[in-house]
Image (cartoon, coloured by chain):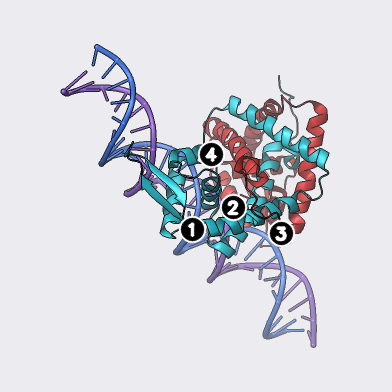
Chain colours: A red, B cyan, C blue, D purple
Amino acid sequence: MANPEACLELPEFLPFRLSVLANRISRSLAAVYRDRFDLRIPEWRVMAVLGQYPDISAEEVARHTCMDKVKVSRAVAGLMAHGRVLRQPDPQDRRRGRLRLSAAGRRVHAQIVPLALGFQAEILADLPAAERRSLEAALATLQARVERVDPRRSDP
Amino acid sequence: MANPEACLELPEFLPFRLSVLANRISRSLAAVYRDRFDLRIPEWRVMAVLGQYPDISAEEVARHTCMDKVKVSRAVAGLMAHGRVLRQPDPQDRRRGRLRLSAAGRRVHAQIVPLALGFQAEILADLPAAERRSLEAALATLQARVERVDPRRSDP
DNA sequence: GGCTAATAGTTACAATTGCAACTATTTTCC
DNA sequence: GGAAAATAGTTGCAATTGTAACTATTAGCC
């Protein structure tokens, strides 16, 4: 039986804290991407994985980014409209398209990556290395647990 | 100078990890609230703070929940429509309303709080107490840092 | 070979959200 | 005392997102 008549302090409730923190961080980052590169967060995520794994399909992008296929589809459409991503039909399987960054896309990617890493470093600046590793381990543990509790896919 | 030509591993990028984790957790919780109580997350947050601080104004609710006033206004409207929250005009300041849970609202609140705490406990089950405290400290540090980097308000 | 189920990706529609503008009231300050 | 600024809260509109349905293609299987 769970603690009866317990009071709940919202500011100490983990789902609340994580949500507020993640949202603040995402918003700050989104402002940078949008102002400097006219990029939304889902688009940035697609570019990030295509920078690392060229010539993968939208479905694989979805797995890497934890986004559902609709969100990926829209992000890819936006990126192609801006000439930042190219799609090449897969001759083996004509349902698929192989996606990769165009030259323009690679230029944007090359500018954003250091910016993103710098932002991350700034956020983590107050955490000593040991606590940083401990935080990362804790996040991994939570992630694994949540996936077992509610085995779903996809993200924002 | 930030690391040039660095590759960025999205799964290790903190803003991404936090966003994915927070969203998974929020979705699992939201499913519970919605199925069992026809409650959305912003509404649940309002109920949580009104359970702890009765007779506060919407503006104070917004501060406690880190939501903007529009979101609070809509959540309160929904809760009043369901008879879960009552508003009493403040005679000292007729712009304000003093909000509190109705009897029905307190009943829902009493059911949800243990449920929410149980969910939190389930998620944290794999983390030893020491690491749990360390995680909470790290989140507080990040939160403080983010607020200094980008002094804004409000959340999802 | 041909029928059924599965998969890749898109489109359509509804719900949620954010931003800006708005109303009503109170406070400030000359 | 009254004009201007500030505050509480709501509303309208646009952007983002989620769910479900849809098309096209491939794989499984009898």
- Per the model, the C-alpha gap separating discs 1 and 2 is 42 Å
Query: Does the CB distance between marks 2 and 3 fall below 8 Å?
Result: no
Q: Earlier in the sequence, mark 1 or mark 4?
A: 4
Query: Does the CB distance between marks 3 and 1 fall below 8 Å?
Result: no
Q: Position of residue B59 (x, y in %)?
A: 44, 38
Give the label, 3 or 1, closer to the camera: 1
Pinpoint the chain carrying mark 4. Answer: B
Query: Does the CB distance between marks 4 and 2 fall below 8 Å?
Result: no
Query: Does the CB distance between marks 1 and 2 fall below 8 Å?
Result: no
Number of residues whose C-alpha sits closer than 10 Å to that of mark 4, classed few (under 14), some (14–19) or many (20 or more): some
Residue A18 visible somewhere in the drawing = yes
- Per the model, the C-alpha gap separating discs 3 and 1 is 33 Å
The residue lying at 63 percent from left, 55 percent from top is: B29
Q: Amino acid at mark 3?
A: Asp
On screen, residue A49 above or below A60: above
- Say which mark, if any, is on residue A150: 3
The residue lying at 51 percent from left, 37 percent from top is: B63
Q: Amino acid at mark 1?
A: Ala
Q: Earlier in the sequence, mark 2 or mark 3?
A: 2
In which quadrant is the N terminus of chain B drawn?
top right
Using the rendered image, report if marks 2 and 3 lie on a common chain.
yes
Pinpoint the chain carrying mark 2. Answer: A
Residue A100 relative to residue B47: left or right = right
Number of residues whose C-alpha sits closer than 10 Å to that of mark 2, classed few (under 14), some (14–19) or many (20 or more): some
Give the label, 4 or 3, closer to the camera: 4
- Say which mark, if any, is on residue A71: 2
Which residue is denoted by mark 4 in the rendering? B64
Using the rendered image, report if marks 1 and 4 lie on a common chain.
yes
- Say which mark, if any, is on residue A51: none
